[in-house]
Image (spheres, rainbow, N blue to C red):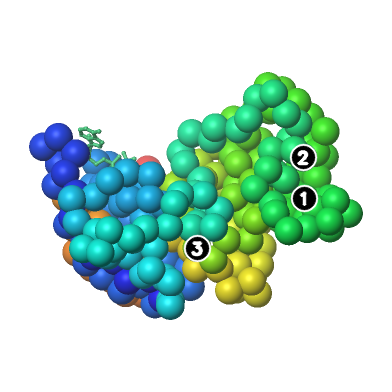
Amino acid sequence: MLELDIKAHRGQFALAASCRLVSPWTVLFGPSGAGKSTILRLIAGLDHPDQARIVLDDQLLTDTASNRHIKPGPSRCGLVTQRPALFPHISVAENIGYGITNLTSTECSQRIESTLALVGANDLSHRPVHALSGGESQRIALARALAPQPRLLLLDEPLSAVGSDARDAILSRLRTWLAEHKIQTILVTHDVIDALTTDAEVALMQEGRITALGPAADVLAAERNRLLSRLQMSQSN
Ligand SMILES: Nc1ncnc2c1ncn2[C@@H]1O[C@H](COP(=O)(O)OP(=O)(O)OP(=O)(O)O)[C@@H](O)[C@H]1O
């Protein structure tokens, strides 16, 4: 369970979010500029809040009142941003192995291989980073965040440049793997279908606030109906 109570300002934008995410897989949905990326960066500890208390199960990640926080990095959470920033001077495999600690080199190689399989990218293992396409870079950035097996994973539109069939396959494998490893995950997506097909708990964010939280079919009922009527209109034209 992830408990959030966060207040922050960015220029004119005010974020004030208070909620308890109990589902292991939450989709954070909302219009552009609602504050989705901002809240993920605050949870990851990369930005300073005005005030925050963030607790993951029994672990206090941030508490501004007592001035305590766990520093950003794999020991706090994994974060995949919209624009993957891979290390350009090392190989794909080395990028993925970067955050892995406490494993022998054989175990580390196995972990890299199995993580590459999860994102459907075993053939990219020895590629130089500069030779990756946008979608391939996103897969490797996702694998790099998964490899240390953090307790919390924050995914900000991680597969937006990957085609829909491949994305569905990766998300489906990922759901199973995350459940097996008990990794709580927040996924930001603009895609209603991603949220509906993964049967997610959805947090709706609008103007810096969480305005609804519940099963995708309830929270996204209006979006789903809009999508269906667009499909019907396109079929009748
Ligand atoms: N450093 C900053 N200074 C001023 N305004 C900022 C800053 N960072 C973010 N904002 C503003 O905060 C708001 C929320 O931005 P954020 O990137 O979190 O939205 P988002 O929901 O992730 O949007 P999108 O879906 O387009 O990625 C936006 O209006 C943005 O312009």
**Residue 78 at x, y percent in the picture:** 53, 53
Looking at the image, in which quadrant does ligand 1 appear? top left
Circle 1 is placed at which residue position? 112
Q: What residue sits right under mark 3 in the picture?
A: 152
- Say whether residue 116 is left or right of residue 34: right
Cα separation, mark 3 vs mark 1, equals 19 Å
Against 182, is 126 above or below? above
Q: Amino acid at mark 2?
A: Ala
In the rendered structure, which amino acid carries the disc numbered 1?
A: Ile
Based on the displayed image, in which of its 4 quarters is residue 23 positioned?
A: bottom left
Q: CA distance from mark 2 to mark 1?
A: 7 Å
First in residue order: circle 3 vs circle 1: 1
On the picture, is 232 further left or further right than 207? right
Which residue is pictured at 64% across the width and 71% down the height? Answer: 181
Q: Nearer the viewer, residue 138 or 52?
A: 52
- Work out which residue is located at the far left of the displayed protein and give it: 12
**Sequence-first tag of 2 and 1:** 2
Question: Looking at the image, can residue 18 be seen?
Answer: yes
Classify 10 Å Cα crowding around label 3: few (below 14), some (14-19), many (20 and above).
many
